[in-house]
Image: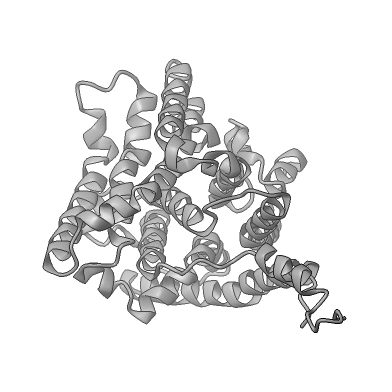
Amino acid sequence: MTYRSDGTCRDAGNISQSFEALPVKAEKIHSLTSLRSFAAAMVVVFHTRREFGYFGLANHLALTQAVSLFFVLSGYILAHTHRTITSKNDLRSFYLKRFARIWPLHLAGAAAAAWLIHFEGGSIAGAAAVLNVLLLHAWSWNINDYFSLNGVSWSLSDEAFFYAVFPLLIWRANTTWAVKLAGTVLLTAAMLLAFKNMGRPLMLWSAYISPITRLSEFMMGIAAYQLREKLGRAIKTGWPASVIEIGVALIAVSAVWAADLKFVSDLPFHPNKPVAIWLSNCGAAIVFALLIAVFALEKGILSRLLNARPLIYLGEISFALYMVHQLVLRYAEDHGYMTPSYSISTKAIAYWLAAIAVAAVAHHLIEIPAQRLVWSRLTARHNVIA
């Protein structure tokens, strides 16, 4: 560092610019982090229903709606953490951080799934494996492709697409969100209409798996974030906010109940099967957007309860739990740990503890180190030296 004759630092301007160029971490919204734990739990209960049942109440809920909650949450949180992307550095930073967020754990899950398949005496199609590792498998309507290896990873393929187009969606979002939301909803409708006379595998792909179909849910999260200031002024802290939070939570639970496929398929107005599939799996998205927007304000009693540290931690490891829960179940079944000599409740408790433990390990040994590595590389590039 050198100084001019007047005592001022010659490099001060460069240092200031470097600090300005660094990505600034947005304040975490703990209530939304905790919500992720409930979404992950819904997915786990759904995927273990054959072994442990639905635990009573969940038997009448469309638990696959949890993926929709994840997508809407993703849109809202990214709009919060990356409100503007105005330079190449912003763009590079965004994509590297998103890569570090999902790909290392996805690769570890794919490798674990490949090992389990080999142990079970099965084989892996080369093309499907390549698509899976590259997070392109949700673009294939072949069920053997989009459910390949670690089956839940199809949603990461969708997320990768959302990340790819996010800079366009967030550009001038405060004035263009309504148009963009309408456009993505039209894309969803077009996908449902285009595949209405196809066989069930194609209808399932078009209504549930396709990144194009699911983009509207991600955009709902971005749109909800644009309304945060108006909503914040309208909702008063204290009991009014608590009443609204409780009401919105009840509406969300009701929507998940109403979206149950048996209920939806009996409705007289659904024009084709893709619509029924979409409603049963994604139809609560607009309610989730409202739920997230209200709880993000953290003005009522429920959002304060969601700030409990155990719930926050479960939310922090929820992505890892989502990624490992089926792998843990397959490992337990392959190695005889699901022996019928134990009661269902005992096996369920043991499974949940094991899945959460493995998720915690994956979170601390894969997720966090990968993100720290990327963050350190980003800061090092700016060469901020006093």
Does 124 appear above or below 310? above
- From the top left corner, tell me how far across and down residue 140 is, in percent: 62, 32
Among the 4 quarters of the image, the one containing residue 237: bottom left
Does 314 appear above or below 151? below
Does residue 182 appear left or right of residue 150 in this picture?
A: left
Looking at the image, which residue is at 67% across and 53% down? 95
- From the top left corner, tell me how far across and down residue 339 is, in percent: 45, 70
- From the top left corner, tell me how far across and down residue 340 is, in percent: 40, 69
Image quarter where the N terminus lies is bottom right
Looking at the image, which residue is at 22% across and 21% down? 269
Image quarter where the C terminus lies is bottom right
- Observer able to see residue 386: yes
- Badge count: 0
Does residue 363 appear left or right of residue 60 in this picture?
A: right
* Color scheme of the displayed model: one colour
Depth check: 251 or 7 in front?
7
Looking at the image, which residue is at 68% across and 50% down? 91
Query: What residue occupies the far top of the structure in this picture?
Result: 197
- From the top left corner, tell me how far across and down residue 333 is, in percent: 52, 64
Among the 4 quarters of the image, the one containing residue 3: bottom right
- Observer able to see residue 341: no
